[in-house]
Amino acid sequence: MIASPDFTTFAVALLASTILIVPIRRFALYYGVVDNPGPRKVHAKPVPLLGGIAIYLGFVLATCLAFHGELQRQTAGILAGGTLLAIVGLLDDRGLLHHQIKLFVGMPLAAVLLLASGVRARLFSGFLPGPSGLLLDGCFTLLWIVGITASFGILDHLDGLCAGIAAVAAAFFTMAATLNGQTMVRTLGAAAFGAALGFLLWNFNPAKIFMGDGGAMLLGFLMATLGVKVHPDGAQSPVSWLAPVLILGVPILDTTLISISRSRRGMLPFTSPGKDHTAHRLSNLGLGHRGAVIAMYCAAVLFGFLGLLVAHISAPMLCLLLVAILAFAGVAIWRLERAPYERQAKQTRPSSHAAQAAGA
């Protein structure tokens, strides 16, 4: 799955993320940086926060070592955007920022840093040359980065869910980059995979620490960035974009479900926390907490394999596959919308910690 140099990158990120949790957890407990139980929380006792710091440090350490400290311009832009979101999320966890700052300032600014470093989609410029194509590509990149980052921010509502889905996605992005011969993307994917997996060892139910908004947004930003970068032979077209969309199918599906569900109830999808996510509904259908999370992992693996498959099948088969996926997604959303969940009242300010709670 990971070539030898990138296995070292993966191992460094995994070990760093796993080991650093110990002092970070003790620090959070000593200074009372914890997420307390509440009516919209799924945990019954205070759980330390700040786990996102371990994810961040594991990823940064592995990346810097892999590139021998000489970061390319794009890699520097990725680290800058990730650092910004980690800081913004940490401040939001402590209630020091208005919750809309991360969505309308932090995430777009991280996307701008990425664009400034030269990381952008090439979806429109391939058939629309000139400034118009570049402008549309820039707008699409901005929307993609913000959308995927936000989707992981609201995915962090059950123990082990966000970190596990990010680990699965990073693994498939690493495999796709290996198949495409994209060395830098493969290395970044291996680092993200290791950092997420290392944290997951502490975060799977019952969680011993939460990642907080900083960790969730960082993972979302990294997954969105890998989605922009990983394409066959560097070519980016509407068809090649099916791969990252499928690899990130679980967070996209969950975000679509709650957007439709909450909009139908007159609520704003990203500012109305509640136990109405896909995993909550699966749990209420009888799978329980762990069963729902594992089911989401299985779905992520299935979507990941489909993402690897799309570049290697004929056009007719690709059309059939696309129709089947859209039909499945439609039926799944329709069925899940009718599954039992805890209805929430309209809120203007969600809790400072969306992670492991009701979800943002």
Image (cartoon, rainbow, N blue to C red):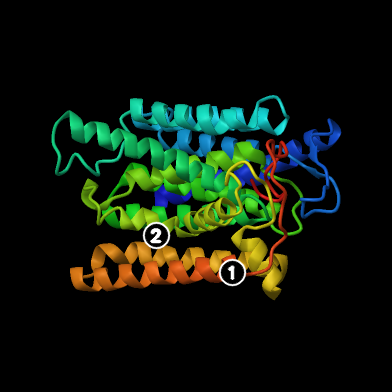
Q: Residue 317, position in %: x, y?
A: 24, 73
Q: Residue 24, position in %: x, y?
A: 73, 36
Q: Residue 301, position in %: x, y?
A: 48, 66
Amino acid, disc 1: Ala
Label 1 CA crowd tier, 10 Å (few <14, some 14–19, many 20+): some
Which residue is label 2 attached to?
246
* Quadrant holding the N terminus: bottom left
In the image, is 247 to the left or to the right of 104? Answer: left
* Quadrant holding the C terminus: top right
Point out which mark residue 13 bears: none
For the point 63% across and 49% down, the residue is 156
In the picture, residue 204 is in which quadrant?
bottom right
For the point 65% across and 65% down, the residue is 281
Observer-nearest of 94 and 10: 94
Please tell me whether mark 2 sits on a helix, a strand or a loop.
helix
Observer-nearest of 46 and 99: 99
Give the total number of marks visible in the rendering: 2
Which residue is label 1 attached to?
295
For the residues bearing labels 1 and 2, Cβ distance under 8 angstroms: no
Amino acid, disc 2: Leu
Observer-nearest of 60 and 127: 127
Residue 83 visible somewhere in the drawing: no
Please tell me whether mark 1 sits on a helix, a strand or a loop.
helix
Depicted 81 relative to depicted 356: above or below: above
Q: Measure the alpha-carbon separation of dots 1 and 2.
A: 16 Å
Q: Residue 180, position in %: x, y?
A: 27, 54
For the point 67% across and 73% down, the residue is 285
Residue 38 visible somewhere in the drawing: yes
Q: Earlier in the sequence, mark 1 or mark 2?
A: 2
Label 2 CA crowd tier, 10 Å (few <14, some 14–19, many 20+): many
